[in-house]
Image (spheres, rainbow, N blue to C red):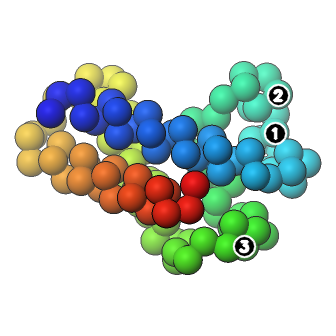
Amino acid sequence: MRIEPFTLLEEVERRLRRTLNRYNRADLPTRTRNILENKGRITLGEYRHVFQEPALWKQLSWPFDQQSFLDRLDIVKKFRDSVAHWDVDAPEAERDAVEATRQMLRLLQLVA
């Protein structure tokens, strides 16, 4: 169980990167373009800036509610931050976060 959060998060991020590659870079928000040009990789928090743009979201034609997707992405981001910083929280909270991440991955497996 201890490795599962890492593998789930890795797969979610991989699928989000793949989705980002569908866009013409010039259409991305300026801050996202700058990060990609300087660092090459964006964070889970930065994906929110991309997916909250109505025109970019529409290009995906995903069968999900945009706000619901963004809310799930926020949960996954918080979980990723806690895992990355070794924040040992109550086991119940971790189970909920792992399940939310699993659900996000299931959504992405349908489309990305």
Instruction: Name the residue at 34% across, 33% down.
Output: 7
Instruction: Name the residue at 44% across, 62% down.
Output: 107
Check disc 1 and give the amino acid type: Arg
The answer to whether the residues at label 1 and label 2 have Cβ atoms under 8 Å apart is yes
Discs 3/1, front: 3
Q: Quadrant of residue 80?
A: top left
The N terminus sits in image quarter: top left
Question: Where residue 33 is drawn, which disc sits there?
Answer: 1
Residue 23: where, in percent of width, then height? Answer: 79, 53
8 lies left or right of 58 = left
The answer to whether the residues at label 3 and label 1 have Cβ atoms under 8 Å apart is no
Quote the CA–CA distance across marks 2 and 3.
24 Å
| Pointer 2 residue | 37
Give the farthest residue toward the right: 26
76 lies left or right of 15 = left
Instruction: Name the residue at 81% across, 33% down.
Output: 34
Q: Is residue 50 above or below residue 31?
A: below
Check disc 2 and give the amino acid type: Glu
Residue 67: where, in percent of width, then height? Answer: 52, 72
Mark 3 residue crowding within 10 angstroms, few (<14) / some (14–19) / many (20+)? few
54 lies left or right of 67 = right
Local SS, label 1: helix
